[in-house]
Image (tube, rainbow, N blue to C red):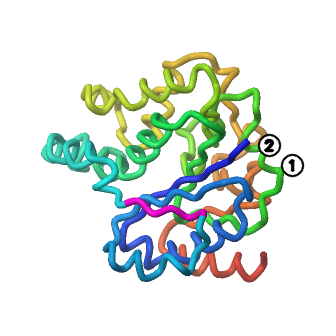
Amino acid sequence: MKYNVLTSFNQHYWEEVGYQTIKKLDENWHNSGTIYLYHELNQSFVNSIKNEFSSRVEWYSLYDEVPYLSEFIETYKNHPKANGDAGGWRQHAIKWVHKTFPLLQHAKTHSNGWLCWLDVDAECFKKIDDTYIKTICKPEKMLGYLGRKGNYSECGFLSFNLEHPQIKSFLDKWWDIYPSGYFTKISETHDSFLFDAVRKEFGYPEIFDDLNINSNTNKNPFGNSVLGSHFIHAKGQHKSATLQKMSRRA
């Protein structure tokens, strides 16, 4: 079984945390897996740094590999539910599809093993072995996520069982809310809120694995869940300092 992982980032995120977190991911991710990077970097720059990472790190130009992204931006650039005018980041679908589209396109076009999503500002600071990977990618489940009681999920980490018989149906339903325009009818349009909307509508709760189910707080779902032993999610103005501190402890 292969356990692959995917993330995306622009130039700002690369400069702030990307290099460090990708190096850690390359060092610590399960040894079976490929690391897929969907980026907005200059290709000549990418070519100049590739040799600093192992051969399992694969680089994809985001706008070249996900052509629907540009079409979506052009179609909805003036829509308040897509451009942030209706409510800042909560109503800024264009911002969040830079994450959702590469993930969904990749997952929909592959059918073997597991595919995990990890936000680029979430660092993997401890080696992931065979025993641990099965706690976040349970073979009997279709999808792992970080739920939060009374709030939308934390989608900084997701794990998809691409061999589950219902995964393609779920991925199609999630994808279709964008080209259909259905996402504009949902109260918030960021990635986590839309993921929850599709998950709840899909049904079959037994095939979804809430990795944060034992937490009594909505705060810090990475740290309070099963992910806390191997990952930290650094948010806000102090991302770099938080990750550097954790790296020294690891």
**Which residue has dot 1 on it?**
131
Q: CA distance from mark 2 to mark 1?
A: 6 Å
- Residue at position x 78%, y 75% in the image: 250
Closer to the camera in the image, 90 or 156:
156
Classify residue 220 as left or right of residue 194. Answer: right
Location of residue 82 with respect to 37 vertically, above or below? above
Query: Residue 29 lies in what quarter of the image?
Result: bottom right
Q: Which residue position holds label 2?
A: 134
- SS at badge 1: helix
Q: Which residues are magenta?
A: 56-60
- Tell me the residue at 47%/29% (across/down): 171
Identity of the residue drawn at 13% across and 45% down: 78
User: Could you tell me residue 230's position as x and y percent?
Assistant: 75, 61
- Is 169 left or right of 27, judged from the image as shown? left
**Main structural element of the magenta stretch: helix, strand or loop?**
strand
Q: Position of residue 202 (x, y in %)?
A: 52, 19
Residue type at mark 1 is: Thr
- Check residue 53 for magenta coloring: no
Left or right, 96 with reference to 3: left
Question: What is the secondary structure assignment of the residue under circle 2?
Answer: helix
Tell me the crowding category of disc 1: few under 14, some 14 to 19, or many 20 or more residues within 10 angstroms, Cα based.
Answer: few
Can you see residue 229? Answer: yes
> x, y percentage for residue 77?
16, 47
Residue at the far top in the pictured view: 203
Q: Which is more toward the observer, 153 or 132?
A: 132
Residue drawn at 53 percent across, 53 percent down: 6
Where is residue 27? Give x, y as percent: 70, 70
Q: Are marks 2 and 1 in contact (CB under 8 Å)?
A: yes
Question: In this orientation, does residue 148 appear?
Answer: no
Say which amino acid is labelled 2.
Answer: Lys
